Image (spheres, rainbow, N blue to C red):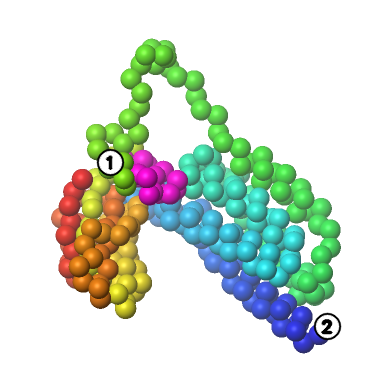
Amino acid sequence: MSDRSEKARDEFLSESQEIVEQLNRDLLAIASPAGGGDRPEGRVDPELVNDAFRAVHSLKGLAGLFGVNRMMQLSHHLENLLDALRLGKVAISGDLLDLLFEAVELYQQVIAETGQNGMGETPSPAIEDFIIRVDRASLPEQVAAPAPGLGPGAVPEQPFGEYEIDPMLLAVLTEYEEHRLKENIREGRDLFRIQASFPLLSIDLELENLKLCLKPVGEVITYLPGAGGSDPERIDLEVMLGSSLGPDAVIQAVGSFSVEIVPL
């Protein structure tokens, strides 16, 4: 093995191992939701599912970059399953969690075999069988037939309840963000717009700190550019938050930030 190919292998092994370990930690947290903050016990933090989705997406990109096709194919199909899960098209169950933990074992197997045999590919019947089961689990759950009296002419369900959501806002939301907005409304949470202004040079750190402060009291659904922009050295952002703890808890959570909190 040349020095260049050995270096590529070591880089792949190091990065993929780190991502798989983080994926395993996310799955353990999903399997043992503890509640806390404004989340009742047993309610899975949607950000954990989103983190697992991003981890698998990263593994797919990494495997594609280094030509590890077994891992790339495994990740592609697993990504579809996690995307369906985070969008509420399939539900978390014991069988589905078992499938996800099995994926971690297969990732570890691919990493170990790559470390022993180099970047070359070998057939893997176990992965092929796993992909079939993942694809089956990714199928959207059947929607129950409407109850009597809810046929043609009935008033359709209002996806945003009594909230009047700006169509311009909906136009820029991703499918995942719109789903999370609907879920927060369905669960009876209050919605808040948090308007903030951050120094341009520290925007990433400041925004991350704000999100960390808000996490115990609710779910950050999205953040978008604000309507300001008069100061070229600052960036105005608007955060949409769903919370069941009320405005006082939100105000207390962001006490160290200069923001304006507007209930929707």
Badge 2 local density, few (<14 within 10 Å), some, or many (20+)? few
**Residue at 31% in and 36% down:** 160
Question: Residue type at mark 1?
Answer: Ile
Query: Does 145 lie within the magenta span?
Result: no
Q: Quadrant of residue 253?
A: bottom left
Magenta stretch bounds: 170-185
Q: Nearer the viewer, residue 221 or 124?
A: 221
Q: Position of residue 33 (x, y in %)?
A: 44, 53
- Classify mark 1: residues with Cα within 10 Å, few (<14), some (14-19) or many (20+): few
Residue at the image point whose x is 23% and y is 65% from the top: 229
Q: Which residue is mark 2?
A: 1
Q: Which mark is residue 19?
A: none
- Compare marks 1 and 2 and give the one earlier in the sequence: 2
Q: Mark 2 belongs to which amino acid? A: Met
173 inside magenta stretch:
yes
- In the rendered view, does 201 fall on the left or right side of 1? left
User: Residue under circle 1?
Assistant: 165
Rendered position, 256 above or below 8:
above
- In the image, is residue 7 above or below residue 224? below
- Marks 1/2: CA–CA distance: 59 Å
Q: Is residue 79 left or right of residue 144?
A: right
Quarter of the image with the C terminus is top left
Q: Does the image show residue 41?
A: no
Secondary structure beneath disc 2? Answer: loop
Instruction: Please tell me whether the stretch drawn in magenta is mainly helix, strand or loop.
Output: helix
Judge whether residue 260 can be spotted in this image: yes
Please tell me in which quadrant of the rendered image residue 203 appears.
bottom left
Marks 1 & 2, CB-CB < 8 Å contact: no
Residue at the (33%, 57%) spot, across then down: 223
Q: Secondary structure at mark 1?
A: loop
Residue at the location (45% across, 19% down)?
Answer: 146
